[in-house]
Amino acid sequence: MKYANDAAIDSYSEWQQTQGIPIHRGFFIENLQNVELSPWGFKGGLGAFINLDGAGGTNDAYVCEIPAGEQLKPQQHLYEEMVFIIEGHGATSVWQKEGKKHTFEWRPGSLFAIPLNARYQHFNGQGRAPVKYFAVTNAPFMINLFHNLDFIFNNDFTFTDRLPVEEDDYFSGKGQLWGRKMSVNFVADTREIQLYEWKERGAGGKNVNCGLAGNVMGAHISQFPVGRYKKAHRHGPGAHVIILSGQGYSLLWPDRGERARVDWKPGSVVVPPNQWFHQHFNSGAEPARYLALRWNSWRYRFVALSDDRPVDVSVKEGGAQIEYEDEDPEIHEIFEQALAKVGAPCGMGAMVPWCRG
């Protein structure tokens, strides 16, 4: 094989540039509803890539719009994809080269994953309004790993373990639950799904972890009450945090580095950079809930991007979490100042040694 020069090749970036749609970068998306889109021939709708710094090039995201009364082109690809419906009602059909076609309906707040290399098509079920969805994929990793687009987009291999041919209720949303861990392929509404107590993360919060379609990427949904904030923690790259409800902010900082702040509301997205500590604060008048789409499902570990430190164990004990008593007191001061601006009481009480609320 001959090479034209000695420059490193980024196969994903080269493919991305051919798509001709906007690429949004940076640290934070204030509102997914306002992301600039343009016609996307590959999908048959409108779209834009979301390549935030915190993903570190390991995974990506995109926003896609399906015009009123229309459908996207049938798709198939050898990378994982999780889909969150931002607005609109419609349906998706999923099928293998052989076997039945699965069709299920979705609405705002729905979450599902496309089984690896299965064929699928999205339909807008509304005649007068567009549908908009947000998807997180591991396309950067897979395209750069194989650097052969024909292998990625025209591969006939059928993953019968990801979507069994005989499965009848694959997208029924029933799922199986073990504590806070759920194996499920369709969540009808991430804003209403039942969550379960997670004492270790603090703030009276609740959580559920979703393993989707046998993916090595996964999702979790967390909620915490008014006047509370969660403990700081860190992990690997690529966790796309989508705010579902509430108003607040997040602090993010590298070890022994300066803190950055992002203020969020429903529709905001933030991706904490690799191994940066980050902490989420509810400074609004209702419970705050978010959805995180990221590497490493609870069932399948992905060695290249895994972090063996427990995310809910203190850093002093080999984990990745900062306990309340070990945090910088200024963090709590900032929180009380934010609450004072909206006239909300602090609910941290005895959880934080220096709480005045």
Image (cartoon, rainbow, N blue to C red):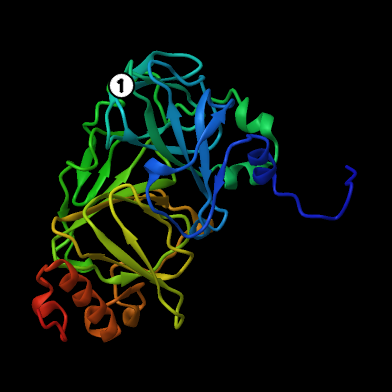
- Where residue 150 appears, as percent x and y from the top left, is 68, 29
Residue drawn at x 15%, y 45% as measured from the top left = 194
Q: Nearer the viewer, residue 330 or 128?
A: 128
Q: Quadrant of residue 173?
A: top left
Instruction: Classify residue 353 as left or right of residue 210.
Output: left
Q: Is residue 154 above or below residue 110?
A: above
Q: Which residue is mark 1?
A: 104
* 213 up-or-down from 197: above or below: above
SS at mark 1? strand
Q: Residue at x 27, y 22 (%)?
A: 169
Quarter of the image with the N terminus in it? top right
- The quarter holding residue 16 reads top right
Q: Is residue 43 above or below residue 219?
A: above
Total number of numbered discs in the rendering? 1
Q: Where does residue 231 sit, x and y in percent of width and height?
A: 26, 71
Q: Is residue 339 left or right of residue 257?
A: left
Up-down relation of residue 159 to residue 190 (above or below)? above
Residue 356 in percent (x, y) is at: 11, 83
Q: Please state if 227 lies on the left or on the right of 36 as rendered.
A: left
Camera-side residue of 233 and 279:
279
In the image, what residue type sits under mark 1? Answer: Phe
Crowding around mark 1 (Cα neighbors within 10 Å: few <14, some 14 to 19, many 20+) is some
